[in-house]
Image: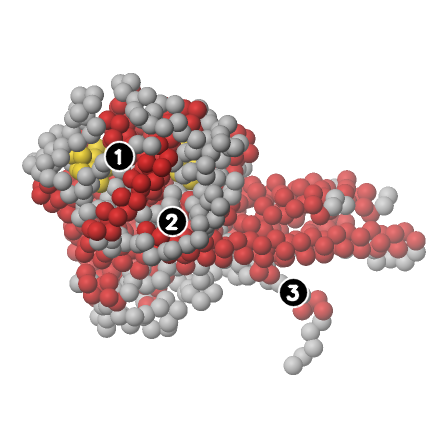
C-alpha cells in the first residue's frame, strides 16, 4: 500500500459528484432513514394485491413479476385513458421551474430530485418514451427514458418521498398537481407489488376491522370509556357518548389516533365535552372507526373501498348526516373523491345544525360536515360559554394542515375556534401558512420511524417558521387539525424546536368550555396546571 | 499590518467565501438556489447557513469563547446531521474556513522569513487552532443531534407500546407519590 501524506489522509470530498438527473441509481443501504419498509406479504395477501412476498429495498433482486415492464406499461396506458388530468399533467409542463423550490423535501434535503418538476419527470420521461412520438424517435434527446429496474427503484424511492401535499401545485402556472402524478405512480408501483408497510398495513386493518390499528369493537369501547373516566377526573362531569346506536341524528367519525394516541386523545376529550355541553344526539361507530383513508396513498380503487364503510355504516345506523373530526386527508377524500366514488348519499339528509339551525349547504351532497365548521358556527351564534383564561398557560400558533387547507379551503374556521378559546394566538409568516402552508413532512404514509431522517428534512421549513414564532412571541404550542400532523409534528418539534408542544384545536376548546355542573378546574385536559394554579393543581 | 488585522478588515469577504464553499457542498442545482433566494422562509437552509457562518466567522476572528459559538454552530450542524451526508461531510464545513482564509490572505501568508513572517505564521496558527477547536465542538454537536434522533425513535416506540399495554389493562404499576410514572410523551409542554 502506498504511503499517504497527512494532507491526503484528511482529505474530504465535500463537493458532491456531478450527476446527470437521468442517472437513476440509488444506494438504499447508504440512504437508510430516508425510505420506508416495504409492505408485508400478509397485508398484500389479505387485500388481494399483486405479488405478495418478503423483500427489502436493500436487496439487489426485488422479486418483481417477470413481465413487470408490460404490467406498468399497460397500467399507465389504462390510466391515461381513464384520467384526462393525468395526460394533461404529463403533456403540459413547460419546465418553467416555478414549482422547483416549493417542495419542503427539496428545501430540507437539498436533493434536486425532490424538486416537484424532477419528481414528475421520473414518470414523465417513461411516458415520453412509450407514449409520445418524439420520445419514441429521439429517445433521451427528447427527455425519454427506458423503464429499467433501476428506474423503477428510483420511482419507489422518490414517489414515497412525496407527501402528496400539493404545495407545488399552488405555484404552477398551469395548475399541474404533482401530488396526482405521485398518486398514479404509486398505483403503478402497487401493480407490481411495490408499496410500503406504513400504508398497506393500515389499509388492510381498516378493511378488516374498520380502523388503521386493527382495534376491535370491545377495545374501541374500552378506549372511549378510558377517556370518559379521564374527563370526569379533570372536569367532574361524566359524559355519555354512545357507540353503534341506531337512530341517532348524526354519526361522528374521527381518525383513530384521536381515541388512541397522544396527543390526539385530548382532542377527542374536547369533542366529547362539546357534544355533552350541547346535548347532541350523536353516535360513534366501532366499525366506521377511522376517518383516515390510506387508500389515498395506494390507489383510487382502495380509496373507494375504504370510504364506502362510512356510508354503509351511516345507512345501517339510520343517521341523518355525518360529522367528521380533526383529520387531514379524510377531508380530501370527502371533498374531492367521495361524492364521485360512492355518492350521492341520497339516503341521508342535508346537514343542519340542531343547535343553530344553520344549513351546511356546501355539504348538501356528501352530507358530511367538518367539526371546525360546526363549532365555528356555534361560536358565531354565541352558543358556547368559554373561559379563555384556561388556556393562558399556552401561547398558541396554528399549523394549516395540507389537506384541509389546500384541498378543502378550511382556513378561517379553525382560527375562529382558536381565537374564541385562547387569549394568545400568533400567526407564523404568511408564506408558510394557509394555502402556502408547509407540510409536516410525514403525510401520505411517510410518518414512520424508519423514515425519520427524511421527515426531519421535509419538516424543516415548517419547523423553521415555528422557531421564528417561538422566538418572537414565546409560542409554546402549535395546534393543528390533522391526526397525522399531531403524531409527526410531535417528533418534528422534538428535534427542531423542543420548546413547543403539539395539540388539536378541540383540545383547547375543551379546556375553555365551561360545562354546566363542572368542578373548578385546576388543570387542562392533559393534567397540566392552569396558569396561576401551579401550586394548587393535583397533577 | 498584522495578518489578523488584515483579515478582520476583510471579514465580510471571508464570511462570504466561507459561506459559498459550504453551499457548494450541495449539488449544483441546489447550491444555486440556496445562494440566491434571500427569504428565510422560502430558503431556510441557505439563509441559515449564510447567517450562522457570518456569526461563526466573526467569532473565530475575535476569539469568542466556545459558549458564544454554540448557537450558530448548532443551527448548522442540526441541519446537516439529518441530510444525506456522511459524518465527515456534515461537520467538515468548519474546516472550509481554512480554505477561505487562505484565499483571502493569499497563499504566501506566513511563508517568508524574518520577524514579520514569523508573526504572520503565529497569527495563522492561532486562527487554525480556533478552527480546530470549533471542528471538535461540531463533532460534539453532531453526535448530540444523532442521539436525539435515536431518542425520538425510541420514545415513539415506547410511547406506542406503553399506551397499548396501559389501555389494555395489562399494566400493574407502582404509582409514584402524586404522579403516575409515564414516559415523556404524556404531559409534554
Ligand atoms: S405534492 Fe408536496 S411533497 Fe409532493 S412534490 Fe409537491 S410539494 Fe413536494
Ligand atoms: S410549475 Fe408547472 S409547468 Fe412549471 S415546471 Fe413545475 S409543473 Fe412544470
Query: Quick check: is the Cβ at mark 3 less than 8 Å away from ligand 1?
Result: no
Given the image, what chain letter belongs to the residue carrying mark 2?
A: A
The foreground one among B27 and B183 is B183
In the rendered structure, find residue A11 and report the number of the disc placed on it: 3
Measuring 29% from the left and 18% from the top, which residue is drawn there? A382
Quick check: can you spot residue A296?
no
Image quadrant in which the C terminus of chain A is located: top left
Measuring 37% from the left and 73% from the top, which residue is drawn there? A60
According to the image, label 2 marks what residue?
A442
Rate crowding at label 1 as few (under 14), some (14 to 19) or many (20 or more) other CA atoms within 10 Å.
Answer: many
Given the image, what chain letter belongs to the residue carrying mark 3?
A: A
Q: What kind of element bears circle 2?
A: loop
Tag in front: 1 or 3 = 1
Quick check: can you spot residue A232?
yes
Rate crowding at label 2 as few (under 14), some (14 to 19) or many (20 or more) other CA atoms within 10 Å.
Answer: many
Earlier-in-chain disc, 1 versus 3: 3
- In the orientation shown, which residue stands out farthest toward the bottom? A1
According to the image, label 1 marks what residue?
A239
Earlier-in-chain disc, 2 versus 3: 3
Give percent across and percent down for residue A433: 41, 34
- Real-space Cα distance between discs 1 and 2? 34 Å
Q: What kind of element bears circle 3?
A: loop
Give percent across and percent down for residue A321: 14, 34
Given the image, what chain letter belongs to the residue carrying mark 1?
A: A
Earlier-in-chain disc, 1 versus 2: 1
Amino acid at each position: 500500500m502506498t504511503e499517504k501524506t497527512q494532507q491526503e489522509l484528511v482529505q474530504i470530498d465535500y463537493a458532491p459528484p456531478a450527476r446527470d438527473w437521468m442517472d437513476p441509481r440509488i444506494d438504499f443501504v447508504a440512504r437508510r432513514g430516508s425510505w420506508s419498509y416495504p409492505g408485508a406479504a400478509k397485508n398484500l395477501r389479505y387485500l388481494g394485491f399483486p405479488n405478495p412476498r418478503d423483500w427489502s429495498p436493500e436487496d439487489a433482486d426485488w422479486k418483481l413479476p417477470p413481465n413487470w415492464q408490460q404490467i406498468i406499461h399497460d397500467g399507465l396506458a389504462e390510466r391515461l385513458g381513464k384520467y384526462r388530468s393525468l395526460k394533461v399533467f404529463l403533456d403540459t409542463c413547460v419546465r418553467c421551474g416555478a414549482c422547483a423550490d416549493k417542495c419542503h423535501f427539496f428545501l430540507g434535503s437539498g436533493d434536486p430530485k425532490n424538486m416537484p418538476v424532477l419528481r414528475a419527470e421520473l414518470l414523465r420521461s417513461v411516458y415520453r418514451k412509450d407514449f409520445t412520438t418524439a420520445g419514441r424517435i429521439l429517445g433521451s434527446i427528447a427527455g425519454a427514458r427506458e423503464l429499467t429496474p433501476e428506474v423503477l427503484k428510483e420511482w419507489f424511492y422518490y414517489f414515497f418521498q412525496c407527501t402528496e401535499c400539493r404545495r407545488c401545485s399552488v405555484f404552477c402556472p398551469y395548475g399541474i398537481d404533482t401530488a396526482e402524478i405521485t398518486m398514479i405512480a404509486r398505483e403503478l408501483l402497487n401493480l407490481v407489488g411495490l408499496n410500503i408497510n406504513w400504508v398497506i398495513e393500515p389499509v388492510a386493518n381498516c378493511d378488516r376491522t374498520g380502523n388503521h390499528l386493527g382495534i376491535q369493537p370491545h377495545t374501541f369501547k374500552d378506549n372511549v370509556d378510558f377517556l370518559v373516566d379521564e374527563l370526569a377526573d379533570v372536569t367532574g362531569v361524566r359524559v355519555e357518548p354512545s357507540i353503534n346506536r341506531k337512530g341517532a341524528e348524526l354519526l361522528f367519525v374521527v381518525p383513530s389516533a384521536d381515541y388512541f394516541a397522544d396527543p390526539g386523545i385530548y382532542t377527542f376529550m374536547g369533542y366529547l365535552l362539546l357534544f355533552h355541553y350541547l346535548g347532541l344526539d350523536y353516535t360513534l361507530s366501532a366499525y366506521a372507526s377511522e376517518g383516515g383513508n390510506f387508500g389515498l396513498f395506494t390507489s383510487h380503487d382502495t380509496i373507494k373501498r375504504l370510504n364506502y364503510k362510512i356510508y354503509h355504516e351511516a345507512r345501517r345506523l339510520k343517521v341523518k348526516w355525518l360529522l367528521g373530526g380533526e383529520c387531514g386527508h379524510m377531508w380530501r377524500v370527502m371533498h374531492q373523491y367521495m361524492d364521485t366514488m360512492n355518492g350521492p348519499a341520497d339516503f341521508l339528509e342535508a346537514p343542519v345544525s340542531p343547535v343553530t339551525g344553520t344549513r351546511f349547504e356546501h355539504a348538501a351532497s356528501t352530507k358530511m360536515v367538518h367539526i371546525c365548521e360546526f363549532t365555528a358556527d356555534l361560536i358565531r351564534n354565541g352558543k358556547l360559554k368559554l373561559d379563555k383564561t384556561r388556556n393562558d398557560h399556552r401561547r398558541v400558533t396554528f399549523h394549516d394542515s395540507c389537506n384541509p387547507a389546500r384541498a378543502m379551503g378550511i382556513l378561517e374556521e379553525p382560527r375562529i375556534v382558536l381565537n374564541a378559546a385562547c387569549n394568545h394566538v400568533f400567526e407564523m409568516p404568511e408564506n408558510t401558512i394557509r394555502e402556502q402552508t408547509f407540510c409536516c413532512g410525514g403525510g401520505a404514509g411517510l410518518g414512520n420511524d424508519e423514515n425519520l431522517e427524511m421527515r426531519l428534512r421535509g419538516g424543516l421549513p415548517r419547523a423553521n417558521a415555528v422557531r421564528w414564532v417561538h422566538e418572537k412571541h414565546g409560542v409554546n404550542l402549535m395546534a393543528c387539525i390533522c391526526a397525522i400532523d399531531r403524531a409527526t409534528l410531535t417528533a418534528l418539534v422534538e428535534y427542531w424546536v423542543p420548546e413547543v408542544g403539539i395539540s388539536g384545536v378541540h383540545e383547547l376548546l375543551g379546556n375553555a368550555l365551561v360545562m354546566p355542573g363542572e368542578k373548578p378546574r385546576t388543570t387542562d385536559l392533559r393534567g397540566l396546571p392552569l396558569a396561576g394554579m401551579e401550586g394548587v393543581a393535583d397533577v | 499590518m498584522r495578518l489578523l488585522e488584515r483579515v478582520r478588515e476583510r471579514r465580510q469577504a471571508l464570511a462570504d467565501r466561507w459561506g459559498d464553499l459550504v453551499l457548494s457542498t450541495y449539488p449544483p442545482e441546489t447550491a444555486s438556489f440556496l445562494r440566491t433566494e434571500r427569504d428565510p422562509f422560502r430558503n431556510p437552509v441557505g439563509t441559515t447557513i449564510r447567517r450562522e457562518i457570518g456569526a461563526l466567522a466573526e467569532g473565530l476572528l475575535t476569539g469568542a469563547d466556545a459558549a458564544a459559538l454554540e448557537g450558530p454552530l448548532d443551527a448548522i450542524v442540526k441541519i446537516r446531521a439529518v441530510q444525506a451526508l456522511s459524518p465527515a461531510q456534515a461537520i467538515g464545513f468548519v474546516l472550509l474556513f481554512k480554505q477561505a482564509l487562505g484565499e483571502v490572505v493569499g497563499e504566501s501568508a506566513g511563508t517568508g522569513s524574518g520577524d514579520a513572517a514569523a508573526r504572520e505564521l503565529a497569527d495563522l496558527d492561532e486562527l487554525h487552532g480556533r478552527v480546530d477547536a470549533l471542528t471538535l465542538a461540531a463533532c460534539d454537536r453532531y453526535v448530540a443531534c444523532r442521539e436525539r434522533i435515536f431518542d425520538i425513535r425510541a420514545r415513539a416506540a415506547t410511547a406506542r407500546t406503553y399506551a397499548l399495554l396501559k389501555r389494555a389493562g395489562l399494566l400493574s404499576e407502582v404509582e409514584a407519590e402524586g404522579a403516575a410514572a409515564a414516559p415523556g410523551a404524556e404531559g409534554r409542554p
